[in-house]
Amino acid sequence: MNKFILLGLVFSLGLGSCNRFEYSPNQIFDRNSPQDINASSLKRLGDGKTDDKVRFILTGDTQRSRDETVAFVKKVNEMPDVDFVLVAGDFTEFGVLKEMEWIARSLSKLNVPYMGVIGNHDLTSRGREVFERMFGALNYSFTYGGTKFICHDTNSREYKFNGQVPSISWLKTELQPQADVSNYVAVSHVPPLNSDFDQNLVKDYTDAFAQTPGFLASLHAHTHVYELYYPDDSGIPYIITSAMGNEEFLLVEIINHKISFERISF
């Protein structure tokens, strides 16, 4: 009888502390999961209307790089006058909750707000649901210091190249002239000349940017190596940041309607 009582107590304690165990890789949240990080960060950031120098960090591909992410946070926190950090996708390798929580927990130590963009690995398993709950919409935008940042999903392969990702119609709406916007910057995970991007949409995608006055740059991650290229004759740079695991990120500045980039090692 004592044995059954003991087993019952052990079972009860297990239920009472269920948050300590990961019962399923399909779990999309637990009591420790942060929620709506992008919205909270943007509220904290504000609109920067009086900021005549926009200075931010671009990084990406944090998957399997928890130690490097900790070192990254330390480096960024030592840098002066950084306004915010953009993480251009692939928080996870397998779209699992715990992976995204680990990285989010490390990034929460940043002294400045950070926002996330969806990556192709983040869409595996139930990663989309995890991302949407933890960060928010897959396509969103914000304006800071007169520059509109258009963050969006370009992970075409994960949608079987259905012709809807990236959403050209959504992008064109976001690129319409606005009274408080002088410049535009696009941020996504997969760059348009990569095979994971729907090649049937490349021209419409790059044309939408080329036809927008004040469009400064298109920023990406995904390939894990730094690259700067020009896909057309518009003069618009397309920049890919190195992966977090390579211990490198980009420092981006926008001053007087001009954009510049610096590779930073840590």
Image (cartoon, helix red, strand yellow):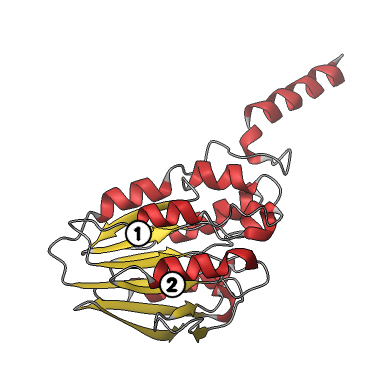
Give the image quarter of residue 197.
bottom right
The x and y percentages for residue 113 are 34, 58
Label 2 amino acid? Ser
- Indicate which disc residue 218 carries: 2
Establish if 98 lies above or below 80. Answer: above
- Indicate which disc residue 175 carries: 1
Disc 1, SS: loop
Q: Residues within 10 Å of mark 1 (few under 14, many from 20)?
A: many
**Number of the front mark, 2 or 1:** 1
Label 1 amino acid? Leu
**Does label 2 or label 1 sit earlier along the sequence?**
1
Give the image quarter of residue 181.
bottom left
Decide if residue 59 is in sight here. Answer: no
Seen from the viewer's position, the closer of residues 5 and 106 is 106
The x and y percentages for residue 139 are 46, 51
Q: Is residue 192 left or right of residue 239?
A: right
Establish if 217 lies above or below 235. Answer: above
In three-dimensional space, the C-alpha distance between marks 2 and 1, rounded to whole angstroms, equals 13 Å
